[in-house]
Amino acid sequence: MAIIIDGNHLTLHDFMKVVRSHEVVELSQDAMERLDHSHDVIKHIIDEGRTVYGVNTGFGKLSDVAISKKELSKLQENLLKSHACGVGSYFNDEVVRGIMLLRVNALAKGFSGIRRKTVMQLVEYLNHNILPRIPEQGSLGASGDLAPLSHMGLTLLGLGEVTYQGMIMPTLEALEKAKLSPLDKLVAKEGLSLINGTQAMTSIGAITLYDAIELSKLADIAGAMTLEALNGITDAFSTKIHEARGHIGQIQCAHNINKLIKNSKYVTSQGQLRVQDAYSLRCMAQVHGASKDAFSYILSKVETEMNAATDNPLVFDIDQVISGGNFHGQPMAISFDFMKIAIAELANISERRLERLVNPQLSEGLPPFLVADGGLNSGFMIVQYSAASLVSENKVLAHPASVDSITSSANQEDHVSMGTTAARQARDILNNTKRVIAMELFTATQALDFRYKEQFCGDGTKIAYRIIRDQIPFISTDQIMYPYIEKAIQIVENQTIQKAIASTIELY
């Protein structure tokens, strides 16, 4: 069944259905009627000869230059050509599909003056999986994602390049294969309507957020396995402790840990082996929970932005075409900077737990670096090095992009958000964090084998252990390690463990 796009009700869940599972989309009837109304307003303005920014003027600092009626179509085409200045690597297919979907949803609100026909062209591309080639770099995040969205907009006219059927090709070639035709032209305001907005940063950030929420569950699983491998103390996860503080994420994490280690014979009570654990074990719920709460906040901001009118000017009625700044990416920039910190902290504490597993002074009787005949064998020594390097890299990436600004368009646009940079950095931190948690899972499984393997594991950790051991063997003597790390990362990427555990245990 198609996802109905009306400009107001897109959720992260439905967004991911379209982006990752290629669900078909359709414009609602109400949305099409709103598009027709707002375009009629633009036609009326042109017929009256009124001057309105972006309709019959230049752009940015050139907004005081009037454009004749006969050149309005050329103005919009020139806008896309001149603004398509992206550089660097290209966004992957998921991000591009997200950009297209979010732009369709923003236009469906009916405040942009664009024709129904033009929006439907973008819908056709999305449903046929004709994906514009969009470079990652070049956006200041105000006036929206101008460069990335221009690369998208060009393809509607048959210009630029796309990916189609797994191949890069000129847009016209893809359209011929798909038996579609390009638009013959853009009319007044349409070029501007396609590129004023935050859809590039929001697409990257939304996909990153979705995966970060899932990764936070896996961080709980990895932490629970390490807790078992180190004979950790369960009292720290008492419901009473976490309800006494009241933070939802913290309560959820404690719930997850308790469910995962239920029936475990490895964990201990306070005073049984020692009075307290180190913070990386004892404070897991507080640290992981804070990230969960951050993700909940960011989700509310992302879903608001997904359904936002980010164009300029906005077309409300014949006498109400109002210039403003809804294209400014600051709400997303600050949210994605927050997300960078929240994700990075999952890696920080994971690496500290990994260190405890391999360090014989901290590992509660486990062999040094989790290998027999230490000295001749180095075991998991450099696994921890690799994790530490990624954690350190995350600290650099976590510096907030939103505190930076640089002027553009001859100082007319004198404050920008850098929100797309923040989103890209959040994605990079997520990828690093996946790798760190994969290394913790790999290492904790090795540590459990020096106890009594999975037979005494908890209800949830036992499932995780078996999945890893089905694909990665016990390391008895030094091996070439990177293929095993890559296998662990693949397990994380595929969300194999969370999916398996979800069949018996509800995780938050």
Image (cartoon, helix red, strand yellow):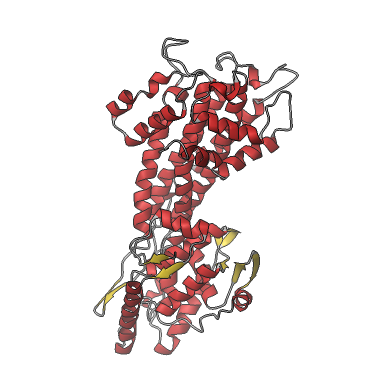
| Residue 360 against residue 390 in the figure, above or below | above
Toward which corner of the image does residue 73 lie, by quadrant? bottom left
Q: Is 368 or 83 nearer to us in this picture?
A: 368
Residue at the farthest right position: 376
Q: Position of residue 49 (x, y in %)?
A: 31, 87
Q: Position of residue 97 (x, y in %)?
A: 51, 62
Q: Is 260 or 79 nearer to us in this picture?
A: 260
Whether residue 137 is visible, yes or no, is no
Asked whether, in this view, residue 497 is left or right of residue 307, the answer is right
Q: Position of residue 28 (x, y in %)?
A: 36, 71
Residue sitting at 42 percent across and 48 percent down?
A: 336
Whether residue 504 is visible, yes or no, is yes
Residue at the farthest left position: 319
Asked whether, in this view, residue 368 is left or right of residue 99, the answer is right
Asked whether, in this view, residue 173 is left or right of residue 148, the answer is right
Q: Quadrant of the N terminus?
A: bottom left
Q: Quadrant of the C terminus?
A: top left
Toward which corner of the image does residue 474 lie, by quadrant? top right
Q: Is 81 or 21 nearer to us in this picture?
A: 21
Residue sitting at 43 percent across and 82 percent down?
A: 187
Q: Is 34 or 134 nearer to us in this picture?
A: 34
